[in-house]
């Protein structure tokens, strides 16, 4: 049986021009999938920062996760293209 992929195992990319019809591009991280980041997380928000002074940080991702004994944390990652993501640059 192939490994389970779900809300907590990976973050994937889907594209749409109208918000109704979506496509899942085949990417290189896991061939044949649309996975952009393999890490355990609870929820994720990604946005395009049009005013970013650093081109490598145009896209920002906040990911919530549970970590013992701390509890919930938010981790920030950056990307130039929304596909390849940095390591965590900040955690709170």
Image: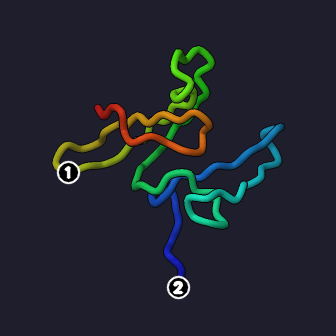
Residue nearest the viewer, comparing 54 with 19: 54
Query: Percent x, y for residue 15?
Result: 73, 45
Residue placed farthest to the left in the image? 69
Task: Using the image, determine if residue 62 lies above or below residue 71.
Answer: above
- The residue shown at (58%, 56%) is 35
Identify the colour scheme used. Answer: rainbow
Of badges 1 and 2, the one in the foreground is 2
Neighbourhood count class around disc 2 (C-alpha, 10 Å): few under 14, some 14–19, many 20 upward: few
- The residue shown at (40%, 34%) is 76
Please indicate whether residue 73 sits to the left or right of residue 33 in the image. Answer: left
| Picture quadrant of residue 47 | top right
Separation (CA) of disc 1 from disc 2: 30 Å
Where does label 2 land, which residue?
Answer: 1
Please indicate whether residue 20 sits to the left or right of residue 40 in the image. Answer: right
Circle 1 SS class? loop
Residue nearest the viewer, comparing 56 with 66: 56
Residue nearest the viewer, comparing 71 with 63: 63
- The residue shown at (77%, 49%) is 22
Please indicate whether residue 73 sits to the left or right of residue 2 in the image. Answer: left
Task: Using the image, determine if residue 83 lies above or below residue 57.
Answer: below
Neighbourhood count class around disc 1 (C-alpha, 10 Å): few under 14, some 14–19, many 20 upward: few
| Picture quadrant of residue 33 | bottom right
Query: Percent x, y for residue 32?
Result: 67, 66
What count of labels does the image hold? 2
Task: Using the image, determine if residue 2 lies above or below residue 53.
Answer: below
Query: Percent x, y for residue 23?
Result: 77, 53
Circle 2 SS class? loop
Please indicate whether residue 82 sits to the left or right of residue 42 in the image. Answer: right
Where does label 1 land, which residue?
Answer: 68
Along the polypeptide, which appears first: circle 1 or circle 2? Answer: 2
């Amino acid at each position: 049986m192939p490994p389970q992929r779900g809300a907590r195992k990976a973050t994937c990319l889907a594209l749409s021009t109208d918000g109704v019809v979506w496509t899942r591009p085949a990417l290189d991280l896991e061939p044949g999938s649309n996975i952009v980041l393999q890490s355990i997380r609870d929820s994720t928000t990604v946005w395009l920062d049009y005013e970013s002074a650093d081109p490598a940080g145009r896209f920002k991702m906040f990911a919530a996760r549970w970590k013992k004994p701390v509890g919930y944390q938010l981790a920030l990652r950056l990307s130039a293209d929304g596909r390849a993501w940095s390591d965590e640059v900040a955690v709170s």
